[in-house]
Protein backbone atom coordinates (compact mmCIF):
# COMPACT_ATOMS: atom_id res chain seq x y z
CA UNK A 1 0.00 0.00 0.00
CA UNK A 2 1.42 3.36 -1.09
CA UNK A 3 -1.63 5.64 -1.30
CA UNK A 4 -4.65 6.18 0.94
CA UNK A 5 -7.71 4.42 -0.53
CA UNK A 6 -9.92 7.01 1.16
CA UNK A 7 -8.31 10.30 0.01
CA UNK A 8 -5.50 9.40 -2.42
CA UNK A 9 -2.64 10.94 -0.36
CA UNK A 10 0.62 9.07 0.36
CA UNK A 11 0.46 6.73 3.38
CA UNK A 12 3.22 5.97 5.85
CA UNK A 13 3.77 2.82 7.92
CA UNK A 14 3.78 3.59 11.64
CA UNK A 15 2.30 2.39 14.92
CA UNK A 16 -0.95 4.31 15.58
CA UNK A 17 -1.60 5.59 19.10
CA UNK A 18 -3.05 2.80 21.26
CA UNK A 19 -1.86 0.10 18.85
CA UNK A 20 1.21 -2.17 19.08
CA UNK A 21 2.13 -2.84 15.45
CA UNK A 22 2.75 -0.79 12.31
CA UNK A 23 -0.22 0.04 10.08
CA UNK A 24 -0.50 2.10 6.92
CA UNK A 25 -1.70 5.47 8.16
CA UNK A 26 -2.84 8.50 6.18
CA UNK A 27 -1.55 11.73 7.69
CA UNK A 28 -3.90 13.74 5.47
CA UNK A 29 -7.31 12.20 6.32
CA UNK A 30 -6.16 10.20 9.42
CA UNK A 31 -7.48 6.87 8.02
CA UNK A 32 -5.78 3.74 9.40
CA UNK A 33 -5.61 0.91 6.87
CA UNK A 34 -5.57 -2.52 8.52
CA UNK A 35 -4.32 -5.57 6.62
CA UNK A 36 -5.49 -8.94 7.92
CA UNK A 37 -5.32 -12.60 6.86
CA UNK A 38 -7.66 -14.01 4.23
CA UNK A 39 -9.75 -17.15 4.47
CA UNK A 40 -9.34 -19.87 1.85
CA UNK A 41 -12.19 -22.41 1.79
CA UNK A 42 -11.65 -25.85 0.29
CA UNK A 43 -13.31 -29.23 0.15
CA UNK A 44 -12.41 -32.89 -0.12
CA UNK A 45 -15.19 -34.11 -2.47
CA UNK A 46 -15.85 -37.83 -1.81
CA UNK A 47 -17.55 -40.39 -4.07
CA UNK A 48 -17.19 -44.18 -3.90
CA UNK A 49 -13.94 -44.05 -1.89
CA UNK A 50 -12.45 -41.63 -4.39
CA UNK A 51 -11.69 -37.90 -4.24
CA UNK A 52 -12.30 -35.29 -6.91
CA UNK A 53 -9.12 -33.53 -8.04
CA UNK A 54 -8.67 -30.58 -10.39
CA UNK A 55 -5.67 -29.81 -12.55
CA UNK A 56 -4.95 -26.09 -12.44
CA UNK A 57 -5.36 -24.17 -15.71
CA UNK A 58 -4.24 -20.92 -14.05
CA UNK A 59 -1.22 -19.51 -12.25
CA UNK A 60 0.19 -20.05 -9.71
CA UNK A 61 1.00 -23.77 -9.89
CA UNK A 62 -0.28 -24.13 -13.45
CA UNK A 63 -0.62 -27.85 -14.35
CA UNK A 64 -0.47 -29.01 -10.72
CA UNK A 65 -3.30 -30.92 -9.03
CA UNK A 66 -5.47 -29.73 -6.17
CA UNK A 67 -8.89 -30.04 -4.57
CA UNK A 68 -11.46 -27.26 -5.05
CA UNK A 69 -10.48 -24.22 -2.95
CA UNK A 70 -10.50 -20.45 -3.10
CA UNK A 71 -11.01 -17.20 -1.20
CA UNK A 72 -14.13 -16.68 0.87
CA UNK A 73 -16.05 -13.74 -0.64
CA UNK A 74 -17.87 -10.97 1.22
CA UNK A 75 -21.48 -11.88 2.02
CA UNK A 76 -20.86 -15.62 1.78
CA UNK A 77 -20.81 -18.39 4.41
CA UNK A 78 -17.99 -20.94 4.63
CA UNK A 79 -20.26 -23.71 3.30
CA UNK A 80 -21.48 -21.52 0.44
CA UNK A 81 -17.87 -20.79 -0.51
CA UNK A 82 -16.92 -24.50 -0.46
CA UNK A 83 -19.87 -25.32 -2.74
CA UNK A 84 -19.18 -22.39 -5.07
CA UNK A 85 -15.52 -23.32 -5.49
CA UNK A 86 -16.39 -26.97 -6.25
CA UNK A 87 -18.83 -25.75 -8.88
CA UNK A 88 -16.51 -23.13 -10.38
CA UNK A 89 -13.50 -25.41 -10.62
CA UNK A 90 -15.15 -28.77 -11.35
CA UNK A 91 -18.85 -28.07 -12.09
CA UNK A 92 -19.42 -30.41 -9.14
CA UNK A 93 -22.26 -30.32 -6.60
CA UNK A 94 -21.43 -31.02 -2.96
CA UNK A 95 -23.70 -32.06 -0.09
CA UNK A 96 -23.23 -33.05 3.57
CA UNK A 97 -20.30 -30.68 4.17
CA UNK A 98 -18.48 -31.17 7.47
CA UNK A 99 -15.58 -29.02 8.75
CA UNK A 100 -12.41 -31.10 8.65
CA UNK A 101 -9.31 -28.89 9.01
CA UNK A 102 -8.26 -25.40 10.11
CA UNK A 103 -4.81 -24.64 8.72
CA UNK A 104 -2.64 -21.64 9.57
CA UNK A 105 -0.46 -20.44 6.69
CA UNK A 106 1.18 -17.51 8.46
CA UNK A 107 3.81 -17.15 5.71
CA UNK A 108 1.10 -15.99 3.26
CA UNK A 109 -1.38 -14.60 5.82
CA UNK A 110 -4.05 -17.19 5.07
CA UNK A 111 -6.26 -19.50 7.10
CA UNK A 112 -7.60 -22.54 5.25
CA UNK A 113 -10.96 -23.98 6.26
CA UNK A 114 -11.28 -27.42 4.65
CA UNK A 115 -14.49 -29.42 4.56
CA UNK A 116 -15.23 -33.01 3.73
CA UNK A 117 -18.21 -33.21 1.37
CA UNK A 118 -20.20 -35.74 -0.62
CA UNK A 119 -20.11 -35.36 -4.40
CA UNK A 120 -23.77 -35.66 -5.38
CA UNK A 121 -23.20 -37.55 -8.68
CA UNK A 122 -20.76 -38.23 -11.53
CA UNK A 123 -21.76 -35.03 -13.30
CA UNK A 124 -18.53 -33.02 -13.13
CA UNK A 125 -16.19 -31.47 -15.68
CA UNK A 126 -13.47 -28.80 -15.81
CA UNK A 127 -14.56 -25.25 -14.97
CA UNK A 128 -12.72 -22.21 -16.34
CA UNK A 129 -9.81 -22.55 -13.89
CA UNK A 130 -9.20 -26.29 -14.46
CA UNK A 131 -7.76 -28.17 -17.44
CA UNK A 132 -8.78 -31.59 -16.16
CA UNK A 133 -11.00 -33.00 -13.38
CA UNK A 134 -10.69 -36.58 -12.12
CA UNK A 135 -11.96 -38.87 -9.37
CA UNK A 136 -8.85 -40.47 -7.89
CA UNK A 137 -8.38 -43.35 -5.48
CA UNK A 138 -5.72 -42.90 -2.80
CA UNK A 139 -3.06 -44.86 -4.74
CA UNK A 140 -3.66 -42.71 -7.85
CA UNK A 141 -2.98 -39.35 -6.17
CA UNK A 142 0.00 -37.48 -7.68
CA UNK A 143 1.52 -36.55 -4.30
CA UNK A 144 4.57 -34.92 -5.89
CA UNK A 145 2.41 -32.88 -8.25
CA UNK A 146 0.01 -31.33 -5.76
CA UNK A 147 -0.27 -27.55 -6.04
CA UNK A 148 -0.11 -26.56 -2.36
CA UNK A 149 1.46 -27.90 0.86
CA UNK A 150 -1.80 -27.06 2.71
CA UNK A 151 -3.76 -29.43 0.47
CA UNK A 152 -1.13 -32.16 0.78
CA UNK A 153 -1.16 -31.92 4.60
CA UNK A 154 -4.97 -32.03 4.76
CA UNK A 155 -5.11 -35.05 2.44
CA UNK A 156 -2.41 -36.94 4.37
CA UNK A 157 -4.47 -36.57 7.54
CA UNK A 158 -7.64 -37.49 5.67
CA UNK A 159 -6.39 -40.88 4.49
CA UNK A 160 -5.01 -41.74 7.95
CA UNK A 161 -8.42 -40.87 9.44
CA UNK A 162 -10.26 -42.82 6.79
CA UNK A 163 -8.37 -45.97 7.72
CA UNK A 164 -9.36 -45.35 11.36
CA UNK A 165 -12.96 -44.57 10.37
CA UNK A 166 -13.06 -41.31 12.36
CA UNK A 167 -12.66 -37.70 11.20
CA UNK A 168 -11.85 -35.34 14.06
CA UNK A 169 -11.29 -31.64 13.31
CA UNK A 170 -7.61 -31.00 12.62
CA UNK A 171 -5.71 -27.85 13.38
CA UNK A 172 -2.21 -27.44 11.98
CA UNK A 173 0.42 -24.86 11.12
CA UNK A 174 1.56 -25.33 7.52
CA UNK A 175 5.10 -24.55 6.37
CA UNK A 176 5.99 -23.27 2.88
CA UNK A 177 7.01 -25.86 0.28
CA UNK B 1 -12.42 2.52 -1.48
CA UNK B 2 -12.13 5.63 -3.65
CA UNK B 3 -8.46 5.74 -4.65
CA UNK B 4 -6.00 3.09 -5.83
CA UNK B 5 -3.67 2.11 -2.97
CA UNK B 6 -0.99 1.27 -5.54
CA UNK B 7 -0.89 4.46 -7.67
CA UNK B 8 -3.28 6.98 -6.07
CA UNK B 9 -5.64 7.31 -9.09
CA UNK B 10 -9.44 7.10 -8.73
CA UNK B 11 -10.84 3.54 -8.78
CA UNK B 12 -14.13 2.37 -10.28
CA UNK B 13 -16.29 -0.59 -9.22
CA UNK B 14 -16.75 -3.04 -12.10
CA UNK B 15 -16.57 -6.74 -12.89
CA UNK B 16 -13.03 -7.57 -14.10
CA UNK B 17 -12.64 -9.85 -17.10
CA UNK B 18 -12.88 -13.51 -16.01
CA UNK B 19 -14.54 -12.56 -12.70
CA UNK B 20 -18.22 -12.68 -11.73
CA UNK B 21 -18.59 -9.88 -9.18
CA UNK B 22 -17.70 -6.18 -8.94
CA UNK B 23 -14.25 -5.23 -7.61
CA UNK B 24 -12.56 -1.89 -7.20
CA UNK B 25 -10.39 -1.61 -10.29
CA UNK B 26 -7.76 1.00 -11.18
CA UNK B 27 -7.94 1.98 -14.84
CA UNK B 28 -4.58 3.77 -14.55
CA UNK B 29 -2.32 0.98 -13.21
CA UNK B 30 -4.77 -1.95 -13.78
CA UNK B 31 -4.62 -3.09 -10.13
CA UNK B 32 -7.67 -5.06 -8.92
CA UNK B 33 -8.42 -4.48 -5.22
CA UNK B 34 -10.15 -7.46 -3.63
CA UNK B 35 -12.10 -7.07 -0.40
CA UNK B 36 -12.65 -10.25 1.63
CA UNK B 37 -14.03 -11.23 5.04
CA UNK B 38 -11.97 -10.87 8.21
CA UNK B 39 -11.39 -13.47 10.88
CA UNK B 40 -12.30 -12.70 14.48
CA UNK B 41 -10.75 -15.06 17.03
CA UNK B 42 -12.29 -15.45 20.47
CA UNK B 43 -12.11 -17.72 23.48
CA UNK B 44 -14.32 -19.02 26.26
CA UNK B 45 -11.85 -18.94 29.20
CA UNK B 46 -12.86 -21.59 31.76
CA UNK B 47 -11.90 -21.84 35.44
CA UNK B 48 -13.75 -23.76 38.18
CA UNK B 49 -17.01 -23.96 36.17
CA UNK B 50 -16.91 -20.24 35.58
CA UNK B 51 -16.13 -18.15 32.47
CA UNK B 52 -14.03 -15.00 32.22
CA UNK B 53 -15.95 -11.99 30.94
CA UNK B 54 -14.71 -8.52 30.03
CA UNK B 55 -16.67 -5.29 30.16
CA UNK B 56 -15.87 -3.19 27.10
CA UNK B 57 -14.08 0.13 27.72
CA UNK B 58 -14.13 0.97 24.00
CA UNK B 59 -16.63 1.49 21.20
CA UNK B 60 -18.62 -0.18 19.76
CA UNK B 61 -20.78 -1.59 22.57
CA UNK B 62 -19.05 0.41 25.28
CA UNK B 63 -20.04 -0.93 28.73
CA UNK B 64 -21.37 -4.24 27.38
CA UNK B 65 -19.93 -7.62 28.37
CA UNK B 66 -18.08 -10.05 26.15
CA UNK B 67 -15.46 -12.79 26.11
CA UNK B 68 -11.95 -12.01 24.78
CA UNK B 69 -12.05 -11.69 20.98
CA UNK B 70 -10.51 -9.65 18.18
CA UNK B 71 -9.14 -9.66 14.65
CA UNK B 72 -6.55 -12.22 13.61
CA UNK B 73 -3.38 -10.34 12.67
CA UNK B 74 -1.01 -11.08 9.78
CA UNK B 75 1.70 -13.57 10.71
CA UNK B 76 -0.29 -15.04 13.58
CA UNK B 77 -1.96 -18.44 14.08
CA UNK B 78 -5.53 -18.79 15.34
CA UNK B 79 -4.33 -20.08 18.72
CA UNK B 80 -1.79 -17.26 19.04
CA UNK B 81 -4.56 -14.74 18.35
CA UNK B 82 -6.89 -16.28 20.95
CA UNK B 83 -4.11 -16.12 23.57
CA UNK B 84 -3.11 -12.57 22.61
CA UNK B 85 -6.67 -11.27 22.85
CA UNK B 86 -7.19 -12.90 26.28
CA UNK B 87 -3.99 -11.24 27.46
CA UNK B 88 -4.74 -7.82 25.89
CA UNK B 89 -8.29 -7.63 27.19
CA UNK B 90 -8.00 -9.42 30.54
CA UNK B 91 -4.28 -9.95 31.20
CA UNK B 92 -5.26 -13.64 31.30
CA UNK B 93 -3.19 -16.65 30.26
CA UNK B 94 -4.94 -19.47 28.39
CA UNK B 95 -3.89 -23.08 27.88
CA UNK B 96 -5.44 -26.19 26.30
CA UNK B 97 -7.23 -24.30 23.54
CA UNK B 98 -9.72 -26.36 21.52
CA UNK B 99 -11.71 -25.10 18.51
CA UNK B 100 -15.34 -24.82 19.52
CA UNK B 101 -17.34 -22.75 16.99
CA UNK B 102 -17.11 -21.39 13.44
CA UNK B 103 -19.62 -18.58 13.00
CA UNK B 104 -20.55 -16.84 9.75
CA UNK B 105 -21.46 -13.16 10.15
CA UNK B 106 -22.12 -12.39 6.52
CA UNK B 107 -23.77 -9.06 7.39
CA UNK B 108 -20.41 -7.67 8.55
CA UNK B 109 -18.14 -9.90 6.42
CA UNK B 110 -16.64 -11.70 9.40
CA UNK B 111 -15.97 -15.30 10.36
CA UNK B 112 -15.60 -15.97 14.08
CA UNK B 113 -13.36 -18.80 15.25
CA UNK B 114 -14.12 -19.44 18.92
CA UNK B 115 -12.00 -21.65 21.16
CA UNK B 116 -12.60 -23.15 24.57
CA UNK B 117 -9.56 -22.62 26.77
CA UNK B 118 -8.38 -23.16 30.32
CA UNK B 119 -7.54 -20.05 32.33
CA UNK B 120 -4.19 -20.89 33.89
CA UNK B 121 -4.80 -19.10 37.25
CA UNK B 122 -6.68 -16.30 39.02
CA UNK B 123 -4.16 -13.71 37.85
CA UNK B 124 -6.30 -11.56 35.55
CA UNK B 125 -7.28 -7.90 35.47
CA UNK B 126 -8.62 -5.36 32.96
CA UNK B 127 -6.42 -4.63 29.94
CA UNK B 128 -6.59 -1.29 28.09
CA UNK B 129 -9.81 -2.20 26.25
CA UNK B 130 -11.73 -3.43 29.33
CA UNK B 131 -13.17 -1.53 32.30
CA UNK B 132 -13.87 -4.66 34.35
CA UNK B 133 -12.98 -8.38 34.17
CA UNK B 134 -14.94 -11.04 36.07
CA UNK B 135 -15.25 -14.80 36.41
CA UNK B 136 -18.97 -15.53 36.09
CA UNK B 137 -21.02 -18.66 36.72
CA UNK B 138 -23.76 -19.44 34.19
CA UNK B 139 -26.52 -17.90 36.34
CA UNK B 140 -24.52 -14.67 36.72
CA UNK B 141 -24.12 -13.96 33.00
CA UNK B 142 -25.76 -10.67 31.91
CA UNK B 143 -27.41 -12.20 28.80
CA UNK B 144 -29.19 -8.95 27.92
CA UNK B 145 -25.99 -6.95 28.25
CA UNK B 146 -23.70 -9.01 26.03
CA UNK B 147 -21.91 -6.99 23.36
CA UNK B 148 -22.39 -9.24 20.30
CA UNK B 149 -24.96 -11.76 19.05
CA UNK B 150 -22.09 -14.03 17.92
CA UNK B 151 -20.82 -14.30 21.50
CA UNK B 152 -24.32 -14.89 22.88
CA UNK B 153 -24.95 -17.70 20.36
CA UNK B 154 -21.61 -19.38 21.11
CA UNK B 155 -22.22 -19.20 24.87
CA UNK B 156 -25.78 -20.57 24.60
CA UNK B 157 -24.41 -23.64 22.79
CA UNK B 158 -21.56 -23.92 25.27
CA UNK B 159 -23.79 -24.25 28.33
CA UNK B 160 -26.05 -26.79 26.60
CA UNK B 161 -22.94 -28.82 25.69
CA UNK B 162 -21.53 -28.52 29.20
CA UNK B 163 -24.65 -30.09 30.65
CA UNK B 164 -24.24 -32.96 28.15
CA UNK B 165 -20.51 -33.22 28.88
CA UNK B 166 -19.53 -33.12 25.20
CA UNK B 167 -18.24 -30.24 23.06
CA UNK B 168 -18.60 -30.89 19.33
CA UNK B 169 -17.51 -28.21 16.85
CA UNK B 170 -20.41 -25.90 16.06
CA UNK B 171 -21.02 -24.12 12.79
CA UNK B 172 -23.71 -21.46 12.63
CA UNK B 173 -24.88 -18.45 10.66
CA UNK B 174 -25.38 -15.49 12.98
CA UNK B 175 -28.01 -12.81 12.39
CA UNK B 176 -27.58 -9.15 13.39
CA UNK B 177 -28.98 -8.07 16.76
Image: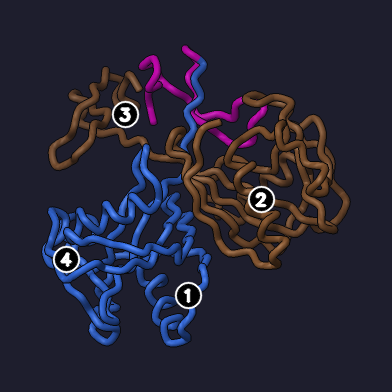
Chain colours: A blue, B brown
Label 3, label 4: how far apart the Cα atoms are: 30 Å
Label 4, label 1: how far apart the Cα atoms are: 30 Å
> Is the residue under label 4 in contact with that under label 2 (CB below 8 Å)?
no
Instruction: Give the labeled residue for mark 1.
Output: A167
Q: Which residues are magenta?
A: A1-29
Which label was assigned to residue B14? none
Task: Inspect the magenta stretch and tell me whether residue A19 lies in it.
Answer: yes
Whether residue A122 sits left or right of residue A102 in the image: it is left
Label 2, label 4: how far apart the Cα atoms are: 41 Å
Q: Secondary structure at mark 3?
A: loop
Residue at position x 38%, y 62% from top?
A: A97
**Comparing labels 4 and 1, the label whose residue is closer to the camera:** 1
Q: Residues within 10 Å of mark 2 (few under 14, many from 20)?
A: many
> Is the residue under label 2 in contact with that under label 1 (CB below 8 Å)?
no
**Comparing labels 2 and 3, the label whose residue is closer to the camera:** 2
Give a yes or no on whether discs 1 and 3 share a subunit: no
Label 1, label 2: how far apart the Cα atoms are: 23 Å
Question: Is most of the magenta stretch helix, strand or loop?
Answer: loop
Task: Inspect the magenta stretch and tell me whether residue B9 lies in it.
Answer: no
Q: Secondary structure at mark 2?
A: strand
Q: Is residue B131 visible?
A: yes
In x, y percent, where is residue B2? 33, 19
Instruction: Give the labeled residue for mark 4.
Output: A63
Give a yes or no on whether discs 2 and 4 share a subunit: no
Judging depth in this view, the residue of A1 and B65 nearest the camera is B65
Of all chains, the one bearing label 2 is B
Question: Which quadrant of the rendered structure holds the C terminus of chain A?
Answer: bottom left
Label 2, label 3: how far apart the Cα atoms are: 36 Å
Amino acid sequence: MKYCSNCGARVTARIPSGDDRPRFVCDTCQAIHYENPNIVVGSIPELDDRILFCRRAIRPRLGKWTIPAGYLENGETLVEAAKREAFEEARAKLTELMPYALLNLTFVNQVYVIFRGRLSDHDYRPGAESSEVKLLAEHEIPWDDLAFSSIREALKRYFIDRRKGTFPLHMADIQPD
